[in-house]
Structure formats: C-alpha cells, structure tokens
Image (cartoon, helix red, strand yellow):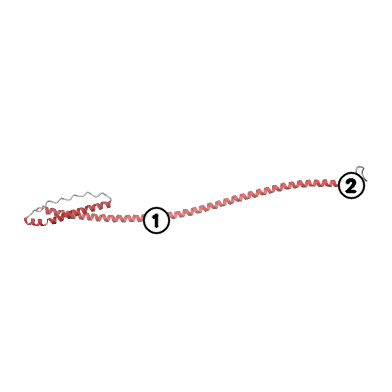
Amino acid sequence: MQTVACQTDTKELVELRVLQESLSAVRDQLTTVSAELGHTERRLRSEVREEYDDRMRTFERRTKEKVKYMKQKQEQSVTTMRKALNAQLGIVKLQQEAELRQEADRHAEQVAAEAVSLRAQLEQQELRIAAHVRENAELREQMERRGTAAPTPAKRGFDDGSEAKVAQLEAQLASRDATIKALREQLSKLMGTTPPAETPPTPSKAKGK
C-alpha cells in the first residue's frame, strides 16, 4: 500500500519510525555516556591533583626531616670537635704551665746560686779589705814609731841607711790604699750601692836625722 504524497510504502514508514526511535535512544545513551565521561574525567583530575599534593607534602616533610637530621649531625660533629679541641687546649695549657713552673724553679735556683756566690764574693772582698786595712794600720804604726823615736848618734847612721826602707814602706802603704779603694769600688758594684767615703790616712811624722 502506498500513500499519495510519496512513493514510500507504509511498512517502510514503520521501519523508519523504529529506526528513528532507535537513533533517539542511542543519542540519549551517547549524551549520558558523554556526561559520565566528563564527570569521570573531572573526578580523575581531582584525584590526580590530590595525590600530587599529597606526594608534594610528603616530599617536603621528608626533605625537612632530612635537613633537620643533617643539622643535628652537624651540630653533634661541631660539639664533638669543640670538646676535643678544648681537651687538647687544656692539655697544652697544663703542659705549658708545668714548663713555665719548671723554668721559674730553675731560674729561682739559678738566682739563689748567684746570690750565694755573690754573698761569698762579698765576704771575700770584705775579708780582703779588712786584711789590707789591718796591714795599712800596722805599716802606719811602724812609720809613726820610726818618726817619733829620739835620734841618737848610733841611730842616726842606721836611720840614714834605712831611708830607702821607709820610702818602700810608704810606697807599699800607698799601693795598699789604692787596692782598698779598688776593692771597695768592686764591692759597691756587686752590692749596687755607692762606695763608702775613704778614711784619710794618718800622716806620718817627720823622720829625725
């Protein structure tokens, strides 16, 4: 059976309607699938972003922990090195103090030995000065006795013959006075003081002829 307006059969129109309905159902399914795909894409992107953020936070946390651990290890190493250096410095300080103490003791012993030697030298110088002073006093007494003795005829010849001996005694007296002066100067240098004033010698009296 055919219609007047077209050459299409009635059976074909039914098939076309069925085909249109099938196409409409497929279109609806495609729209639904497209919407589901969009939702799934958005959900996957959100999950990927969250996982990426989680991984970044985990990496940052681990990095901070590693940095903190390295800082602690470095501080421990520095503390250990500082303690070792302080211990070495303490040992070196003790050794230097012991050496300085030994050096001070040696210097004190040396100074004490020099003081003893200087004291012995001073005593020897004083003894020599006292001996020279004694000898000079004896020479002066001899010269005074010769000068004060009364001249007799027998003694005049003897005195005339002993003038050279008297002159020799006077020369010895002057030499010993000079020796005493030099010894006193040496003694004053050793003691670090000014030499004492010299006692003027007692002038000998005139010799009788």
For residue 100, what is the image quadrant?
Answer: bottom left
What x and y, as percent, mark residue 68? 57, 50
For residue 127, what is the image quadrant?
Answer: bottom left
Q: Nearer the viewer, residue 176 or 84?
A: 176
In screen coordinates, is 106 left or right of 152?
right
Position above or below: 22 against 91:
above
Q: Three-letter amino acid code at disc 1?
A: Glu
In screen coordinates, is 123 left or right of 154?
right
Q: Which residue shows up at 85% across the image and 47% down it? A: 19
In screen coordinates, is 37 left or right of 97?
right
For residue 90, what is the image quadrant?
Answer: bottom left
Q: Secondary structure at mark 2?
A: helix
Q: Three-letter amino acid code at disc 2?
A: Glu
What x and y, as percent, mark residue 161? 10, 57
Residue 99, numbered circle? 1
In screen coordinates, is 86 left or right of 209?
right
Q: Nearer the viewer, residue 185 or 138?
A: 185
Kindly check if marks 1 and 2 are in contact, taking CB atoms under 8 A apart as contact: no
What x and y, as percent, mark residue 170? 16, 54
- Check disc 2 and report the residue beneath it: 12
Q: Mark 1 or mark 2, which has the lower sequence index?
A: 2
